[in-house]
Amino acid sequence: MPTPYPTTLDPNATTSQLLDRARAQARAAMDGYRQTLKVQAKVVENVQADASLIDQLVQRSQGAAGALEAQQAANQLQALAIKQDQQIQSLMAAQYRAQALESARQAQVLEAGKLAARRFIGEASAYTPRP
């Protein structure tokens, strides 16, 4: 399988090779989006599960009998906030990866189009002025 995003395009690539590269690029872009959707679904699931835990921790901190008990509840709330921050970072990283793959695919499509135009025109000029 060809490298989906080579640094330079082979001007002598066959149609079959170009199609293989385009398919590999589309697969990579779709894989990136699928991963993003999976991460998003997991984050939503975790946030929903954490909602009841947050309520319990808030109630526990409000009903704390002493400073130690209140501090423990606050520490648990802080740990939960850190967990949610990490989930947001994972979500953002997955989204940025998907966007980067799509941008790379679009850049390759532009380059392939330019190459195809050069192959079609060849060494000749596309326009010859008439006197």
Image: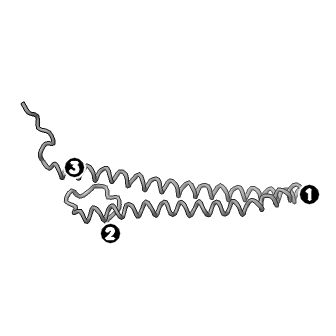
* Cα distance in 3D space between marks 2 and 3: 25 Å
Residue found farthest to the front: 130
Label 3 secondary element: helix
Front residue of this view, candidates 7 and 22: 22
Q: Nearer the viewer, mark 2 or mark 3?
A: 3
Q: Look at mark 3 in the image and give the residue it sits on.
A: 117
In screen coordinates, is 73 left or right of 44? right
**Quick check: marks 1 and 3 in contact, CB under 8 Å?**
no
* Cα distance in 3D space between marks 1 and 2: 65 Å
* Cα distance in 3D space between marks 1 and 3: 77 Å
Label 1 secondary element: loop
Q: Position of residue 102 (x, y in %)?
A: 42, 54
Q: Residues within 10 Å of mark 2 (few under 14, many from 20)?
A: few
Q: Position of residue 37 (x, y in %)?
A: 55, 61
Residue for point 77% across, 57% down: 77
Mark 1 residue type: Gly
In screen coordinates, is 70 left or right of 11? right
Mark with earlier residue (1, 3): 1
* Quarter containing the C terminus: top left
Q: Look at mark 2 in the image and give the residue it sits on.
A: 1
Which image quarter: residue 27? bottom left
Mark 3 residue type: Ala
In screen coordinates, is 124 left or right of 21? left
Residue found farthest to the bottom: 1
Q: Nearer the viewer, mark 1 or mark 2?
A: 2
Q: Look at mark 1 in the image and give the residue it sits on.
A: 66
Q: Residues within 10 Å of mark 1 (few under 14, many from 20)?
A: few
Residue for point 32% across, 69% down: 1
Mark with earlier residue (1, 2): 2
Q: Position of residue 124 (x, y in %)?
A: 11, 45
Mark 2 residue type: Met
